[in-house]
Image: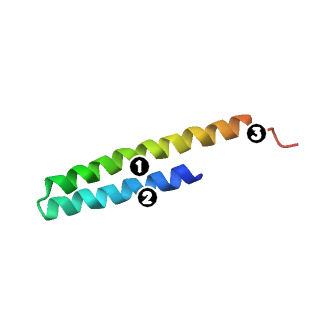
């Protein structure tokens, strides 16, 4: 796992918590912020997946 994958996953989880908290306190604003953070987190995580795949593809094979 690389930095983007870890940070993206944490942001996604934080967004889910924020969205659920918004539902509990009946705050549409907090729900929307939570959803935004989830999208950003998933995007960052996917970016990390791509970077890791590129690193694997360009790494020389072991001897």
- In screen coordinates, is 30 left or right of 14? left
In the structure shown, which secondary structural element does the residue marked by tag 2 occupy?
Answer: helix
Q: Earlier in the sequence, mark 1 or mark 2?
A: 2
- Residues at marks 2 and 3, CA–CA distance in whole angstroms: 28 Å
- Which residue does the numbered mark 2 point to in the structure image? 10
Query: Which residue corresponds to the image point at 11% horizontal and 60% vertical from the top-left?
Result: 26
Q: Residues within 10 Å of mark 1 (few under 14, many from 20)?
A: many
What percent of the width, then of the height, locates residue 62? 83, 43
Query: Which residue corresponds to the image point at 38% horizontal and 53% vertical from the top-left?
Result: 12
The C terminus sits in image quarter: top right
Q: Earlier in the sequence, mark 2 or mark 3?
A: 2
Residue 41 is labelled as 1
Mark 2 in CB contact with mark 3 (< 8 angstroms):
no
On screen, 50 above or below 25?
above
What percent of the width, then of the height, locates residue 11? 40, 55
In the structure shown, which secondary structural element does the residue marked by tag 1 occupy?
Answer: helix
In the structure shown, which secondary structural element does the residue marked by tag 3 occupy?
Answer: loop
- Residue 13 found in image quarter: bottom left
Mark 1 in CB contact with mark 2 (< 8 angstroms):
yes
What percent of the width, then of the height, locates residue 20? 22, 60
On screen, 26 above or below 63?
below
- Residues at marks 1 and 2, CA–CA distance in whole angstroms: 7 Å
């Amino acid at each position: 796992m690389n930095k983007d994958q870890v940070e993206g996953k944490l942001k996604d989880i934080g967004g889910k918590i924020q969205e659920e908290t918004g539902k509990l306190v009946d705050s549409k604003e907090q729900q929307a912020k939570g959803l935004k953070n989830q999208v950003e987190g998933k995007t960052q995580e996917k970016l990390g997946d791509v970077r890791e795949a590129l690193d694997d593809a360009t790494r020389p094979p072991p001897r």
